[in-house]
């Protein structure tokens, strides 16, 4: 938002409370955040009539950012600790399985497209997929704590466990999402912004957590 | 006998850790519980009334306030005043309170209890009263853990006989109602006070049917007069503050037609004072007793604490979550005076390692002309600075100074007071630094006084204590003189 405003690009933000909001919005960028498992299941049910629409957006190259629960529920299902399978939106064929320990730490990711990405992850679910990822985990856990990969990057859709939030300290990702949408709409390239503060903040976090050991937290306190 | 050994072990450990230079406020408790696993049982046995205070924001202030009021009314009390609010903190308070042999008999135990520690504390030592203040959205809430937390707290209370003092204005707290205990609902009447608005809209959903709640009056965050279509709504209050009035000397509350004055400042203290009054009334303190004692109450360190530096009144307040930070900011901007804003953010375990909550603070409202300079400080100073930038604050007004000491020094260089928000582990060092600055200033003015050589020559001969006494005497004389001088036309 702010980075569009600074460039003089008008943005209208539409909060999707029911499916009609989205159908009429003709959006250029969409974003789905996360919540608790319970909330996520409710949200997914409400979004069900939209699945075809969102699928079309993704194939069409609309910019999309999905985080935590929003990322997990892009897939086919989310298996809870009790073995219950919560149905996902099924935008892409993959799944997530919850485990007892929570993966909760500052995370650093080295990405071919975006360079150094920093953020914070906090998730009980482990996500498994065969799509291109955001990058390699340098410190932290990532998608499932085993593959050494974090996130998903398919067309202009990004799924990730990083918040912190992700965009301010990784302005290259924000500009990627805006840039793709802007080019798609106007055919023009995005002008860069002065990003000194963003870059230093990114670098500071990177250096600080490069050599710390992440710990798994037990879910029960 | 086991308990006695536990006390001795605890006391010894406490002394040892002090000698080694740790403040170690919970160490005696940790040790005592190692020796005697059911150590907290003894609190129940040797105290007439046990009161627990829990909730996200304000529990330290409320606990201190209740302890002060009861003590002032002549009750013998035991309390964990330093805000050590886990089970070990309670145990530490017990060790500290116990004489060398046996137990002290207390009228009331006033204990601040961390929300997550409540079930353990309740099972070891069931309380007679439980004050539930509020549950604010923080990092946990994103993952539905507040839901889980509340359910666990409620489970622990099911089988015991306890009276609940509940915040009527908080839909989260209202969920304790279905325990069917004896409830005292406490709240602010609609339009009792003007909490300045801030623009961040929070999602407020009904815990029963997940529909959005409607509010006829919002105090701040999710606190207010709410109603849901399913029938869930704010309960009728038993104790209600009809009016809260702010003055430079503190706040004044009209509670059920009676007026109370306290030196505590800031609207956000309204709830703390109201809960303290309600509880003390339950314990049969009279209104006039409460009123008399309330006047003498003091605030805890780092709770809107004031420091006189360079002739300017600086302020320091603890922030832990967006709701608290927003209220702090609106307090800060009550005066239109020119000022600096410092935000000190650490990400140690006690602060919360995940600092993304700062993006939910309405820092946009701090972007105003009267704030001449912003300082981002602490281990995550760069994150604070970015947050400020995205709040629309001009980059040239933002200074990034991770060192707390240097941040204070930088702010001192300007001729405007600094208003400081700080997370938990920034607080103690800041109180130290600011107190030192304040004293330093006193010594400097004193240095210009008639006896500049005293400190150099007499201090080493007399020692610190006697010198301090002399110093105070001279200063008092000096103040009196200058006071008189000022009165002349
Ligand atoms: Zn409802």
Image: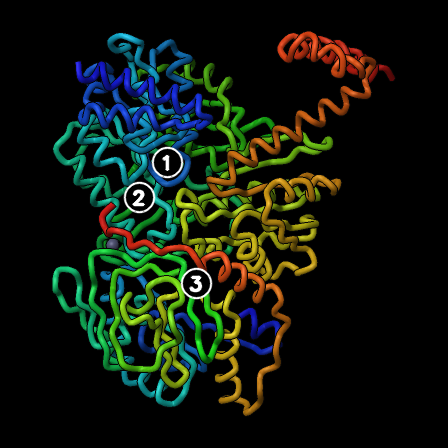
Colour mode of the rendering: rainbow
Q: Is residue A62 left or right of residue B384?
A: left
Q: Which residue is mark 3?
A: A119
Same chain, marks 3 and 1?
Answer: no
Residue at 57% x, 89% y: name it: A188
Residue A61 is marked as none
Q: Earlier in the sequence, mark 2 or mark 1?
A: 1
Residue at position x 66%, y 28% in the image: B438
Q: Position of residue B141 (x, y in %)?
A: 33, 53
Is the Cβ of the residue at disc 3 closer than 8 Å to that at disc 1? Answer: no
Q: CA distance from mark 2 to mark 3?
A: 39 Å
* Position of residue B30 measured from the top left corner of the image (x, y, whole percent): 29, 28
Q: Is residue B23 found left or right of B204 in the rendered image?
A: right
Vertical relation: B52 (above or below) B4: below
Q: In screen coordinates, is B75 left or right of B425?
A: left
What's the mark number on residue B234? 2
- Nearer to us in this view, B191 or B459: B459
């Amino acid at each position: 938002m702010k980075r569009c405003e600074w460039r003089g690009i008008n943005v209208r933000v539409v909060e999707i409370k029911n499916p009609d909001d989205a159908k009429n919005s003709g959006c250029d960028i969409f974003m789905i955040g996360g919540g608790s498992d319970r909330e996520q299941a409710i949200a997914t049910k409400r979004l069900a009539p939209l699945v075809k629409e969102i699928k079309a957006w993704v194939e069409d190259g609309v910019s999309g950012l999905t985080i935590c629960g929003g990322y997990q529920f892009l897939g086919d299902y989310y298996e809870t600790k009790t073995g219950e399978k919560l149905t996902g939106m099924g935008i892409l064929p993959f799944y997530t399985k919850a485990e007892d320990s929570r993966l909760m730490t500052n995370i650093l990711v080295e990405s071919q497209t975006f360079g150094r990405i920093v953020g914070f992850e906090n998730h009980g679910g482990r996500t498994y997929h065969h799509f291109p990822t955001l990058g390699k985990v340098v410190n932290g856990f990532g998608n499932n704590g085993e593959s050494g990969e974090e996130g998903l990057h398919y067309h202009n859709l990004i799924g990730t466990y990083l918040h912190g939030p992700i965009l301010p300290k990784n302005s290259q990702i924000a500009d990627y999402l805006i840039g793709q949408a802007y080019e798609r709409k106007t055919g023009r390239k995005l002008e860069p912004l002065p990003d000194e503060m963003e870059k230093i903040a990114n670098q500071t976090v990177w250096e600080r957590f490069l050599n710390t050991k992440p710990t798994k937290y037990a879910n029960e306190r | 006998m086991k308990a006695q050994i536990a006390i001795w072990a605890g006391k010894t450990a406490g002394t040892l850790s002090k000698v080694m230079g740790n403040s170690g406020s919970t160490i005696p408790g940790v040790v005592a519980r190692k020796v005697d696993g059911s150590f907290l049982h003894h609190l129940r046995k040797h105290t007439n009334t046990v009161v627990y205070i829990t909730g996200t924001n304000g529990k330290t202030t409320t606990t201190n306030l209740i302890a002060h009021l009861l003590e002032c009314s002549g009750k013998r009390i035991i309390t964990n005043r330093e805000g050590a609010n886990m089970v070990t903190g309670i145990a530490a308070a017990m060790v500290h309170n116990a004489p060398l042999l046996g137990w002290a008999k207390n009228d009331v135990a006033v204990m601040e209890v961390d929300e997550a520690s409540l079930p353990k504390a309740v099972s070891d030592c069931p309380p007679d009263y439980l004050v539930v203040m509020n549950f604010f959205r923080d990092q946990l809430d994103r993952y539905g853990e507040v839901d889980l937390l509340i359910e666990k707290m409620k489970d622990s209370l099911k089988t015991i006989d306890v009276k609940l003092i509940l915040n009527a204005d908080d839909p989260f707290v209202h969920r304790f109602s279905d325990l069917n205990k004896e409830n005292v609902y406490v709240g602010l009447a609609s339009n009792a006070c003007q909490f300045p608005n801030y623009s961040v809209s929070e999602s407020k959903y009904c815990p029963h049917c997940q529909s959005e709640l409607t509010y006829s009056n919002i105090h701040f965050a999710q606190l207010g007069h709410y109603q849901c279509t399913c029938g869930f709504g704010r309960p009728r209050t038993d104790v209600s503050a009809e009016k809260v009035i702010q003055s430079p000397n503190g706040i004044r509350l009209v509670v059920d037609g009676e007026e109370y004055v306290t030196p505590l400042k800031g609207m956000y203290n309204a709830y703390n004072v109201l809960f303290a009054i309600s509880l003390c009334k339950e314990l049969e303190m009279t209104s006039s007793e409460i009123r008399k004692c309330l006047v003498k109450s003091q605030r805890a360190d780092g709770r809107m604490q004031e420091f006189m530096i360079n002739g300017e009144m600086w302020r320091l307040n603890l922030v832990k979550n967006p709701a608290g930070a927003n209220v702090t900011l609106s307090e800060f901007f009550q005066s239109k005076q020119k000022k600096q804003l410092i935000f000190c953010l650490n990400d140690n375990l006690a602060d919360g390692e995940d600092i993304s909550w700062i993006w939910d603070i309405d820092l946009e409202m701090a972007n105003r002309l009267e704030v001449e300079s912003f300082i981002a400080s602490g281990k995550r100073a760069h994150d604070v600075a970015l947050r400020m930038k995205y709040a629309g604050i001009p980059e040239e007004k933002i200074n990034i100074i991770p060192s707390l000491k240097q941040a204070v020094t930088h702010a001192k260089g300007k001729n405007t007071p600094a208003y400081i928000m700080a997370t938990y582990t920034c607080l103690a060092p800041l109180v130290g630094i600011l107190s030192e600055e304040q004293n330093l200033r006193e010594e400097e003015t004193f240095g210009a006084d008639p006896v500049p050589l005293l400190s150099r020559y007499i201090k080493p001969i007399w020692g610190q204590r006697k010198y301090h006494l002399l110093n105070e005497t001279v200063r008092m004389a000096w103040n009196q003189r200058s006071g008189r001088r000022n009165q002349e036309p």
